[in-house]
Image (spheres, rainbow, N blue to C red):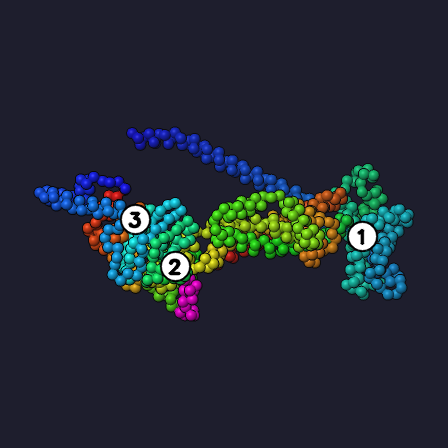
Amino acid sequence: MKGRDTRTAVEASLRRRRRKEVLFRLSGLVATAVGIVFLGVFFASLIGQGASAFRQTFIELDIEYSKDVLAPEGELDLDYADFDAVVRNALWQEFPGVTDRRARRDLLRLVSAAAGFQLRDALLEDPELLGTRERVAVPASATVDMLVKGNIDRSLNEARRPLTDRQLEWIDQLAANDRLEMKFNTALFTNGDSREPEMAGIKGALMGSFYMLIVTIGLSFPLGVAAAIYLEEFAPKNRWADLIEVNINNLAAVPSIVFGLLGLAVFINWLGMPRSAPLVGGLVLALLTLPVIIIASRAAIKAVPPSIREAALGVGASRMQVVFHHVVPLALPGMLTGAIIGMSRALGETAPLLMIGMVAFIVDVPSGFSDPASALPVQIFLWADSPERAFAERTSAAIIVLLGFLLLMNLAAIILRTKVGRRW
Amino acid sequence: MPEPEPVKVLTLMEPTAEGTDENSPDVISGTATRRRRLEEISELTGKTVGQVRCKDPFVVAEDVNVHYGELHAIKDVTLEIGKRQVVALIGPSGCGKTTFLRCLNRMNDSIESARVTGRITLDGEDIYSKSLDPVALRARVGIVFQKPNPFPKSIYDNVAYGPRIHGLAADRAELDNIVHTSLERAGLLKEVRDRLDEPGTSLSGGQQQRLCIARTIAVNPEVILMDEPCSALDPIATARIEDLIDELSENYAIVIVTHSMQQAARVSRRVAYFHLGRLVEVDDTDKIFTNPQHKLTENYITGRFG
């Protein structure tokens, strides 16, 4: 009798249970789909806007490395030679009809200021060029680049677009003569920041981020792991330990700008470290990531089965040997994961860097830990703030590079983890 | 502890006596009274029934008490374990067998709330004296745990770990030798000879437990503690381990915790019965299983307990 009751009861509830399961699975599916759609939209917009920044418009000009212009006194001095005049002459020659001063100034605006530097570099590499003529592709100005990329509306009133009717005409003429050319935008990766979009690059920010992360991981990984091992394996479990644990957990939730203020007060004002330096940025980010790494490492250590510890103790291993022969190797993958999460956070952190001066406009590529530098997210912030249309696509390009950097770090973590994991 | 009626004890314990000796109730009641008196003494004083002492004692525990914080886990346990003797600790779950076992190589040190009082000596040396490092003690008193717990390393490294950290082998050849003989003595060598570099965790449960035993004997301890070494194993693996215990008892003193009466009867020379933190009765195995002195022991071994 009782058996039948169970059966009918179960059968009665079966439909309800199945429906619940289906609903739950469906909601999970919807959530995943929404997530994927958002990710897709994000990437599509990012790549759609940023991809064009990797290509740049160049204008082919007949350049004459004239001795009269470059070395009027017979001797070529690269520091003082007037390469802009060489570019100018080439333009006058290309458009002989333009003689009016204002028109000539407009004409000059088609070519980037980088053109002179490019010619100087070419001559530096090959001094034989002096006195010769050759066709050279020099970078066009950002407005020309924008027009070629279709970001400027020709139908707008002349006063409302950055190019005049005259300039449009010249550009069309150059295009008709097949003198416009799209090339890979190497400047984006080899230059520091610049006020001219076509000369602006992320190398300075990239190097700044790189130096900063080296300081950060060099400090926070060993410190964090050591702290985690001590707290988990050696520290007495008393009220002090609880207090420390609560504080570490709180520290992980402190807004990052507070760490920036701390860095400003302690490292710069009190210890007198240089402003805008990757060293200080790295120190601040190390403080920021330390709690993350400690928490992750402690969790990884806790996850090591106690039976392994007992086994090692049982054959007479000392506490140190238990920790370093057994616990740490088993916890290492988890610790590395924590470190990478921390590093990823540090790489994307902007607010604390604003406080310690890494938001400054810095043209030079830093070559050390104490050189003034910017960082990738700060560079993105700066470019996003710029009014020029050409900076918009560079912002997206910088974000793509930042994401690529992140992806690379995660990949390294996965490789490291499988390598470490395979040891036994 | 419930105080049973004498009559009830009688019917429980002496069914044959009751059946055969109907004419001499005095004899029965005499036995019952004597037993009851013993039990009362035991209840009141915690004094252990039987033979706690043995000839040629190697490990001696005197009035050992263990507290886990508020919990009084072991109460006044006195027990001697002889050289080359297998002693089985039996008793219901939570009675303190394992706790007592772990006192013998100070594994309880790693439990922060545990407090051990009393005196335990190994070959005359107080193992809880300040001058003795638990690391040195555990090299002399090995332990095999309930669940096989090989290190997530190769079979070779599992066995070689102890000798390595203690510096028992001068060179690689000697270490190889130790590993091979240990595996051989643990009866595992034949099965793993060709795959010493495979992870120890890839072995079957019974093999893993024998690997753990090999790991323990590789350090060449003087005493081996076993905490229900067969509880996770099938009868075949259990039989192998029991044979192994037999062989090992020629060289080592072995203390084994077990829940299997048959196993205790098969492998041990002496049996100690624990109940609620007290050592109720210790005696030769034959005596415990044929003629237990204490009612609690008898209840337990006849399966009437709880």
Identify the residue at horizontal 52%, vertical 57% (top origin).
Answer: A419
Residue B129 image label:
2
- Marks 1,2: beta carbons within 8 A: no
Most common secondary structure along the magenta stretch: helix
Q: Is residue A191 magenta?
A: no
Does residue A149 appear left or right of residue B129 in this picture?
right
Q: Which quadrant of the structure image shows residue A223?
A: bottom right
Does residue A71 appear left or right of residue B129 in this picture?
right
- Start-end of magenta stretch: B161-175
SS at mark 2 in the image:
loop
Which percent across, then down, holds residue B259?
29, 49
Does residue A162 appear left or right of residue B294 in this picture?
right
Instruction: State the quadrant of the N terminus of chain B.
Output: top left
Closer to us: A51 or A116: A116
Outermost residue on the left side: it is B23
Mark 3 and mark 2: Cα distance apart in space: 24 Å
Give the mark count.
3
Q: Which quadrant of the structure image shows residue B182?
A: bottom left
- Which residue is label 1 attached to? A113
